[in-house]
Each structure stands twice: as structure tokens, then as C-alpha cells.
Amino acid sequence: MEAASVAPASGALLIDDPDRGVFRVHRSAMTSAAIFEQEQRRIFDRVWIYLGHESEVPAAGDFRTRTMAGRPLILCRGADDEIRVFINSCPHRGAELCREIAGNKKSFQCLYHAWTFSNTGKLLGVPGEDAFGAAFRREDFNLALVPRMTNYRGFVFICFDPHAVDLEAYLGDARAYLDYVADQCEDGMEVVRGTQLYSARANWKLLVENTIDFYHTVPLHKTYFKYLEDMGADISGGVDGRGYDLGGGHAVVEFEAGWGRPVARWEPKWGEAERIRLAALRDRQVARLGADRAHKVCDVDRNLMLFPNLLINDIMAVVIRQVNPIAPDYMEITQWALAPVGEPDLARARRLESFHSFLGPGGFATPDDIEAFEGCQRGFNAFREIAWSDYSRGYDGEVGRPEAEMQSSFEPQIRAFYRRWAGLMGIAAERHG
Amino acid sequence: MADDAATAIDTRAIEAFLYREAELLDAWRLDDWLELFLPDATYEVPATDAPDGRPGIDLFIIADDMQVLRGRVTRLNSVHAYAESPHSRTRHFVSNVQAAAGEDGLIAVKANFLITRIRKGETDTFIGRYDHTLKPDGQTFRYHRRRAILDHDALRPHGRVTIIL
């Protein structure tokens, strides 16, 4: 029923043919209201979704409100130092309980009938409680928690399916890549103050694929690479990477680019003092993690995609990028900068400078990505005439291909995303359109 | 002494400066616009949830020193800056201009802005306030710090800041 109800006349939404090395997704998947709704129910209601970082609520009573999968939520560290995620709706009659974006509260009081809740979620006060009768029990009206929540090394994930597998099982092999990010600092990582909150007039899946697409990097971001060149960087090596399907819909593209990594690959522009500091930092990493792991953490860039909507780019800065589907042709995007706790001021300033010029809505690259896929979204209105978008790069000859022959513009990482998407959506892969 | 400094500030002249700047920006005369900056000036657009952002410490939308700002203008002058190629049509409205003596001979300028960006059938409106510091330069002024603080909770539906605010 599911595939037929959302598929176009031909019936196929996904072409996955290993014999010909062809992988295509039907463009109506980006425009259909029925598919959008089905994504909400079959994906966003079922899988683990990133909500925030523990460093966003560092002190007891700290809270942040945000909407995820359509639900208004409160991320709160209680007086008992436990992090919880509440539904931001008064259990009495549903009013928005916490009306501020961020702050610190010992308790939450509903504006409507003045019910009061502790920051651990317990109902503390009900004016005129007697009138509710003998059957009224306060514990029935504590704040509702999201069904599942796990804080993995500071990354707080939630899930609306009470029966979902544990987060670690969900992440599978992708967990190791999250660990490389978390391992950058023995004292932990923290979200920098200031969030980039933006949007794009396009389907959310286009941002996910764009972030792990290395075929577009050089042509689309010509002006960014020219800027780097004008600044004296050596970009002759290009961006040479490899994409890997990590299973479960997750994927990563690993590469080693010419730019410096704040932890811990030096570039000449940073000067001698920084070279010495980074060398000492690297030595500590090797002592703590071992040489192989330290190499992964310090030298290797990665764009990590955690299905369905979390991208962590660990490059010349560390960006946590999340996309929220709002409509088939509109998404909201949030970006945070993640950085080592205790990072020296000058290194932090350099990290932010790298972040600002490349990443984000005011940078020299992201706006052109948005321009590109907003143009795609407009083009998709002609899906009856041009039906398919192609993700076949590197598919032909993929099995058994030696690493040395894998090119950064290949697309196994994008195919990983769409295979998982199709699986959860109940969409069968066809050999032909 | 403070009064002497206050009377020395010609708010009309600062308004004229801001209007001329708006005209340069709407005409996309960005090389001429760059001339309005001191060599060590900054151009800042704080994050919408941290409007009091501290450069080098907090995340911004834009936090350019002159090297980056020149890079920004070079990029915007290129046909390969696809987000602004062809250029959006912009209209900068500046009002509520107030100026007062700042530190070190600089002038603190506050104003309101409303800027429209029209592109591909969409009109996005940016609303906020300016918090600049200017240095007198002969009959005119040059930017020491040019800061545009947005009122919006988020760049939604704007999506980007590719025009100069």
C-alpha cells in the first residue's frame, strides 16, 4: 500500500541497479506532500534525532527550547544535574509552558492556570487542587518526557519511538566517527555561544546530500577557493576524499585537505608559536589515544552524516549542522560551532574565523550551495517531464574496488542515505524506471 | 567639555554619509563602498540568538576584518558568486539616526535599518539596528566598526546574508 500510494504513475521511486551501476531517485520524492507526511511518520517519528549538546545547558536549571519533529521541547538540566527533554506543553490544558528560548529556571509556571513544575518535571503546585476531586493525583500530571533520550558523550539524541533500538545500536559503525570528534579534547567539547539559524526554500534531503557531495566542491565553490588562494593557502592538492557507507543509513566522507585543523594540523599562516603548541597537543593525543587513533583525530577531515538529518563536518572547524523539514519545499537549518573546552583565545578566534568565512549563511560557500539546490527545487516542478536525479557516480565497479581507486566525487555515501530512506519509507528499489 | 564634543557632531552629516552609503550598496558599487572603511575596521552581523556577540569569542553570521571584507567584495564582484549572480535588487532604508561622541575621538552611531532583497520572485526583508563607530575623515567619515544587529529570531525564510546589510 505504502509504495503505491506515493509513487508516480510508473510506480518506481528508486532505481538501484548494481549490474548497470545506476542509482536514481524520483524527483517527486522532493515535491510530494504525501511523501513528506510519510517521512514524518516513518522516519522522524521512529529514528534517533539529535537535539542538542550538554554544553548548551551547563548549569543546573539551564534550559533551551526548540522544536524537533514538529514537537515543542524543553532541553533542561534539572536541580539534580540530570538532563531531561520535556514536551513543552502544560499537561493540564496544553499551553506552551516555557516561553523563552533559553535561560535558567528553578521551576516552570504555566501562564494560563498557574500550575507550577520543578525543573526536574514534577508538578509542584496546583491552585485550587481540591476542586479536581478525589481521583486527582499529582504524579499523573508531571511534565511529559520524550519517550527516549540518550546523552552520548555530550551529544543529546531523542527518539519518539519507545521501542527503538538503543542509540549505540542505531549509530552502529558511525559511532566511531562521532568518537573522533568527541576525542579532540580530554576535557570535552563545548558548543560556542551564538547559533546560525537559517533556512532554504528546498526539500530537506537536498541539504543532506549536498553536505556529503564532493563532486560539486571545486566548481560551485570557485570563489571560496579563489579567496583561499588570495590568502596564500596552497590549494593545489584539491580536496581528495573517500566516501563510506557506514550502515544504518549513516555515512562519512574522509579526506585530508590543505587547510589547518585546529586539533591538530598546523598551517604556516598560524605562526611558530602555534606550531609548537599544536605539536605538544598532538603528542598528548598520541599518549592518550595511541598513534592510529590520534592520526584519525588530528590529521583527517571528515563530513559525517548521521541519518536522517545530522551532519557533523570536522574540518577547519567543527560544525554541527541539522536540517528540519518544514514543508516539501522548505527546510530550517541550524548550525553550531563545537570546540574544545579550554581552547586558548587565539586558537578559538582562528577557528571562528575559518568557520565564518566558509560555513554558514554569511560565508563564502554555503549561500551558493543553497542557491544551487533551491534551483533544483524549482526544477523539480517539472518532474513529470524530467523524472530522475542521478547518484550513480562510482557505482559501476564498486564491489571489490581498491581504496586507491576510490575518488572523492564518487557517491556511495549519498546512496547509503537514500537506501535507508527507501527502506524506512517502504519504497522498493527497481532496476528500471 | 562633553557639550563641546556633542555640538561638534553633525548628525545631518552622518545621515548624509549613511544615505550615500545606502546608494552605493543598492547600486552594487562595492569597490567604492570599501573606501568607506579604515584599514583596521570590522564588519559584523551577530548571530540572531547572540546579538551582543563578542568577536573572536562568539559565533556570528558575519565577522569580517578588512582582509575578509575585501575577499567578500571580490567574491560579490564575480559572476561565480552564484547566490548574488545576477545581483539581487536591494533597497536600504536607514532611519532614527543618532550620533554621540564615543571613545578615542570616534563617533558612536545608532540607527534603524530595513533592507529588502528581491530575487527570483521572492522578497526578503531584513530588519534591525546599526551600532557603528565612525572616525571623522576630513569632511566625511570612515568606518571603524560597522555592525548590523538583526531583530529576527532566525534567517527564516531569508536563508542567507549575501547582500551587505
Image: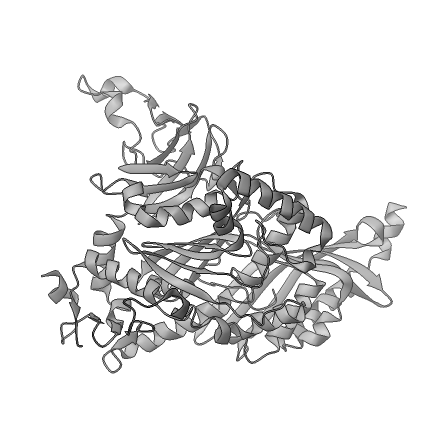
Colour logic: one colour
Outermost residue to the left: A1
Residue A374 sits in quarter: bottom left
- Residue A258 or A80: which is nearer the viewer? A258
Q: Residue A356, position in %: x, y?
A: 58, 58
Above or below, A231 relative to B62:
below
Q: Visible in this render: residue A16?
A: yes
**Residue at x-position 54% and y-position 54%:** A317
- Count of numbered tags: 0
Q: Residue A59, position in %: x, y?
A: 50, 30
Q: Is residue A29 left or right of residue A66?
A: left
**Residue at x-position 29% and y-position 65%:** A415
Q: Residue A386, position in %: x, y?
A: 27, 81
Q: Is residue A104 left or right of residue B26?
A: left
Above or below, A192 relative to A413:
above
Q: Is residue B74 left or right of residue A288?
A: right
Residue A271 sits in quarter: bottom right
Q: Visible in this render: residue A195?
A: no
- Residue B10 or B60: which is nearer the viewer? B60
**Residue at x-position 34% and y-position 35%:** A86
Q: Residue A383, position in %: x, y?
A: 26, 77
Residue A280 sits in quarter: top right
- Residue A361 or A400: which is nearer the viewer? A400
Placement of the C terminus of chain B among the 4 image quadrants: bottom right
Q: Is residue A428 left or right of residue B59?
A: left
- Residue A119 or A348: which is nearer the viewer? A348
